[in-house]
């Protein structure tokens, strides 16, 4: 029995020992797994220690991968305990498992309208109907999207609606690049993609490819690609077809064999390879020339050169022309700008024109040039100083004879003008204003140039010496004030043949003038305003003139004397005026309720003494007959007067306003309208004169009619004195000579009318505001009454100035609104100074544009001279909008400027070289 119990005890002890050993081994595995994953450490460690079964074994840990390997945690843990010896610690082998790095570097967000289906077994997610996926900078929207987590890929495709039509095409966006394919396959890990029928916009280009392979963020390879500037990429008017292209977004497109297709018809236009830059910033490059032929110069290459994109703030274009008869030209065009500081442009044009054949009659050679500079500052950048420039100078016949443009507006206007100015305000007390101005005025008919180099002006703000700065200024004493003005000029009068030559500077005149005006004003009997003023002037010259009779030549000579000289003058003037109101009331039930007449009569007196001390005498012939002169008479500010003047001045200005019942019956107040803006009369009476004391009466006025669509300005001169049979004025009133009270010696009237369909509909007429602005800058008009300007170097500019296409006004087949605009100008001048009794000038000018269809525009500029009974300058303009193309035809059918110009080309500036144009130039252009 004892033996049986002992055996049982030993077997039980062995079993318990084996069981504890096995249990310890199991718990050891669990501990190490927990330690590797940092899971349950806080719970298991105290529990095992309390059981006393913490044993570390030297057996190898299992190396089989578990699902915990994808979690990013540390794989080591240091345990400090007294029960573990150093030997056992050293026997513990380190974990050799390598953590599995996830391919996804960010979170995937997704949503859809119909459903989201998760398949854990296949590791895919299916999104349907308006599905969207976002991963880092990648956005994908489509009808259906499938995400494969096992392959790290996403698939996107279209859906069909109930009619079988495809809808919800994929839209793939990464950064600013957008691709719109039929379907796409994208790998999150490699960032590569396979795209079917991709569509993308790159600047003005639109690219569509049958199969596209995306290598990375910046390189695409496309098979059977087409690229165009048409808005409809699926059915373009034209496109370039290439079997293979390499496309780098916003940088370039490199193609192999490329063929141009128009209206789905292949053309013979093709290149073996092509390179298309697609940068958002300007880049340097070659400007392809235009080829053509004229009867005078033969064949030519025109407007070819190189464009330098120097920086974001500065660029430069160098262009040139060459003609087979030996003529040539070159131009430089630059633009510059600094944000919030200034902006401007500079152009220089030179043409060496040859006509005829050397050695034969009719051969001629002419050099023409033109310089333009425009500079405008930002007012906020320097509020107390300003530098600006508007320069347009050159050869008088440049716009008439230039081979590179037809500027009809400037040809008829005959004036070039320039101005460069700098102004500075000193915020002192009193305030001081300083300005320096260089100006230029050139008559292209007479070739005369008038320049000031420069004009110095300095002005001191008004000073009230008898009134406090903040106090009220009332009365004759407190209103007494004075200012100081300084004006200096260096003036040149020359011709364009002597421009900037030695002779030009020899004829230069200069002078300096000081002016101190003193004035005051006060009320008299409450209703009359009285002003009194006096002016002190001092003029300085560095050159004067002496006259003497040369007995040998038997003529009077003018001898110039260099050296400082000056004269001083002063004058006095005063005036009294008032304002009288008169109102004529009518029945309130009528259309016109009242008319208000405002009169402002004014009577003035002016006195200028004689300054005989500045006059000398000289002999006018050998008989000893003497005459007087002043040595300052040729000065730029003139000379002093040797006659005393005492004048009474009379003026009367009138305005007429009306109150009319408003068409809107909900408005209580009457509507005010202006009948006559101004009707003024003025004359003077010279008390000092012995005869002809009354000066002619000048009458002028103006008004606007038809809601300010028609402006009317008129004027006339009425002379109270009669004339004899020779046409000489007599010291006898016309009424005493059997005539009327006044004799009308001259009169003029001008009418300007403008109207457009947009104004009738209450819309702003923005087209006309920008119309022909290049012609205006070159010295022409702001409208197209003289026709539009054709610049052959500006290939993208429409002659209708509507580069930005507006919303069509055609609103249906039966009910449509045809856009149009109309301008008219009429001028009449009457002369009767010596009983001519004739109309010396009477002409009507008109211009208009009409959209006869959404794609067709027609314009006409013409006029009629009623004196010469003939049609004036006439121009016809036609334009056809061919969507991504444009066709223009400009025709001047008769006259000295008879020309025509035809153009058809791609509207986009990126492909402006793809065009064809043909033109004729006026005969006998070298004048």
Image (cartoon, rainbow, N blue to C red):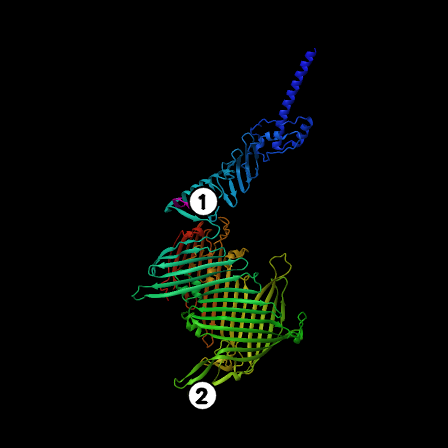
Question: Which mark is in front, 1 or 2?
Answer: 1
In the rendered image, the vertical position of residue 551 relative to residue 183, given as above or below: below
Classify the position of the N terminus by image quarter: top right
Q: Which residue is mark 2?
A: 625
In this view of the protein, can residue 210 be seen by the observer? yes
Q: Which residues are magenta?
A: 252-264
In this view of the protein, can residue 784 be seen by the observer? no
Q: Nearer the viewer, residue 758 or 242?
A: 242
| SS label for mark 1 | strand
Residue 247's disc is: 1
Left or right, residue 766 beside residue 496: right
Q: Which of pointers 1 and 2 lies earlier in the amino acid sequence?
A: 1
> Which residue does the image show at 53% across and 75% down from the upper left?
513
Left or right, residue 896 beside residue 720: left
Report the residue that reaches farthest toward the left. 359
Judge the density around disc 2: few (<14), some (14-19), many (≥20) Cα neighbours within 10 Å: few
> Which residue does the image show at 32% across and 64% down from the upper left?
356
Report the residue that reaches farthest toward the top. 1
Name the spot of residue 415 as percent of width and height, x first: 45, 67
Residue 102 found in image quarter: top right
Disc 1 to disc 2, C-alpha distance: 94 Å
In the rendered image, the vertical position of residue 908 relative to residue 21, given as above or below: below
Name the spot of residue 411 as percent of width and height, x first: 42, 65
């Amino acid at each position: 029995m004892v033996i049986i119990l002992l055996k049982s005890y030993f077997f039980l002890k062995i079993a318990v020992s084996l069981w504890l050993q096995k249990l310890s081994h199991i718990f050891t595995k669990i501990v190490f797994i927990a330690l590797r994953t940092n899971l349950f450490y806080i719970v298991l460690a105290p529990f095992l220690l309390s059981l006393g079964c913490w044993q570390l074994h030297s057996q190898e840990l299992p190396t089989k991968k578990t699902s915990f390997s994808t979690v990013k945690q540390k794989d080591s843990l240091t345990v400090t305990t007294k029960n573990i010896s150093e030997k056992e610690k050293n026997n513990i082998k380190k974990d050799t498992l390598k953590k599995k790095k996830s391919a996804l570097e960010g979170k995937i967000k997704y949503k859809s309208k119909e459903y989201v289906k998760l398949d854990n077994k296949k590791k895919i997610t299916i999104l349907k109907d308006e599905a969207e996926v976002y991963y880092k900078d990648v956005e994908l929207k489509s009808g259906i999207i499938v995400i494969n987590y096992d392959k790290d890929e996403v698939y996107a495709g279209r859906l069909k609606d109930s009619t079988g039509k495809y809808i919800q095409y994929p839209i793939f966006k990464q950064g600013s690049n957008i691709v719109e394919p039929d379907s796409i396959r994208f790998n999150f890990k490699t960032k590569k993609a396979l795209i079917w029928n991709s569509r993308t916009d790159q600047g003005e280009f639109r690219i569509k490819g049958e199969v596209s392979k995306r290598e990375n963020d910046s390189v695409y390879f496309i098979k059977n690609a087409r690229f165009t500037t048409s808005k409809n990429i699926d059915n373009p008017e034209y496109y370039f077809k290439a079997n293979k292209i390499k496309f780098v977004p916003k940088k370039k497109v490199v193609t192999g064999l490329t063929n141009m297709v128009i209206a789905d018809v292949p053309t013979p236009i093709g290149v073996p390879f092509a390179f298309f830059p697609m940068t958002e910033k300007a880049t340097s490059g070659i400007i392809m020339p235009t080829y053509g032929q004229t009867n005078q110069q033969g064949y030519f290459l025109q407007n070819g050169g190189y464009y330098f994109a120097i920086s974001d703030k500065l660029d430069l274009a160098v262009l040139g022309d060459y003609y087979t008869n030996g003529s040539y030209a070159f131009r430089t065009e630059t633009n510059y700008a600094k944000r919030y500081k200034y902006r401007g442009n500079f152009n220089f044009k030179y043409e060496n024109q040859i006509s005829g054949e050397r050695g034969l009659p009719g051969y001629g050679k002419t050099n023409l040039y033109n310089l333009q500079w425009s500079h405008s500052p930002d007012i906020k950048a320097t509020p107390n100083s300003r530098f600006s420039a508007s320069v347009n100078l050159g050869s008088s016949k440049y716009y008439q004879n230039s081979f590179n443009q037809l500027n009809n507006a400037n040809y008829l206007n005959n004036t070039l003008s320039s101005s460069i100015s700098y102004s500075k305000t000193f915020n002192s007390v009193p305030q001081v204003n300083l300005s320096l101005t260089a100006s230029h005025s050139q008559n292209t008919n007479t070739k005369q140039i008038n320049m000031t180099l420069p004009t110095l002006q300095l002005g001191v703000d008004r000073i009230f010496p008898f009134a406090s700065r903040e106090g009220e200024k009332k009365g004759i004493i407190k209103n007494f004030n004075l200012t100081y003005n300084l004006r200096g000029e260096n003036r040149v009068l020359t011709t364009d043949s002597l421009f900037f030559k030695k002779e030009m500077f020899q004829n230069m005149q200069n002078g300096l003038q000081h002016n101190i005006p003193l004035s005051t004003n006060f009320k008299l009997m409450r209703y009359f305003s009285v002003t009194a003023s006096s002016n002190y002037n001092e003029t300085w010259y560095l050159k004067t003139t002496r006259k003497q009779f040369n007995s040998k030549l038997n003529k009077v000579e003018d001898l110039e004397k260099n050296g400082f000289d000056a004269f001083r003058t002063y004058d006095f003037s005063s005036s009294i005026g008032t304002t009288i109101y008169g109102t004529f009331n009518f029945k309130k039930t009528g259309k016109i309720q009242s008319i208000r007449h405002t009169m402002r009569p004014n009577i003035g007196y002016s006195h200028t003494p004689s300054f005989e001390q500045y006059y000398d005498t000289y002999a006018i012939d050998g008989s000893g007959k003497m005459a007087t002169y002043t040595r300052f008479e040729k000065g730029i500010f003139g000379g002093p007067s040797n006659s005393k003047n005492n004048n009474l001045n009379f003026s009367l200005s009138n305005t007429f306003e009306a109150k009319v019942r408003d068409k809107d019956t909900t408005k209580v107040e009457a509507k005010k309208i202006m009948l006559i803006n101004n009707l003024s009369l003025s004359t003077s009476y010279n008390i000092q004169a012995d005869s002809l004391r009354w000066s002619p009466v000048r009458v002028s006025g103006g008004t606007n009619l038809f809601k300010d669509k028609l402006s009317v300005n008129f004027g006339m001169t009425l002379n109270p004195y009669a004339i004899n049979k020779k046409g000489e004025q007599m010291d006898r009133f016309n009424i005493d000579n059997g005539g009327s009270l006044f004799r009308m010696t001259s009169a003029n009237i001008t009418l300007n009318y403008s109207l457009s369909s947009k104004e009738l509909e209450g819309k702003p007429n923005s087209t006309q505001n920008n119309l022909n602005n290049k012609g205006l800058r070159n010295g022409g008009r702001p409208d197209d009454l003289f026709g539009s300007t054709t610049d052959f170097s500006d290939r993208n500019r429409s002659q209708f100035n509507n580069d930005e296409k507006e919303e069509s006004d055609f609103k249906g087949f039966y009910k449509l609104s045809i856009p149009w605009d109309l301008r008219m100008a009429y001028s009449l001048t009457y002369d009767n100074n010596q009983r001519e009794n004739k109309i010396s000038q009477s002409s009507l000018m008109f211009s208009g544009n009409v959209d006869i269809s959404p794609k067709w525009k027609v314009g006409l500029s013409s006029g009629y001279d009623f004196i010469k009974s003939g049609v004036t300058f006439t121009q016809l303009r036609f334009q056809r909008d061919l969507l991504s193309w444009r066709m223009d035809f400009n025709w001047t059918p008769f006259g000295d400027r008879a020309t025509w110009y035809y153009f058809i080309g791609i509207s986009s500036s990126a492909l402006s070289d793809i065009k064809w144009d043909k033109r004729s130039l006026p005969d006998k252009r070298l004048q």
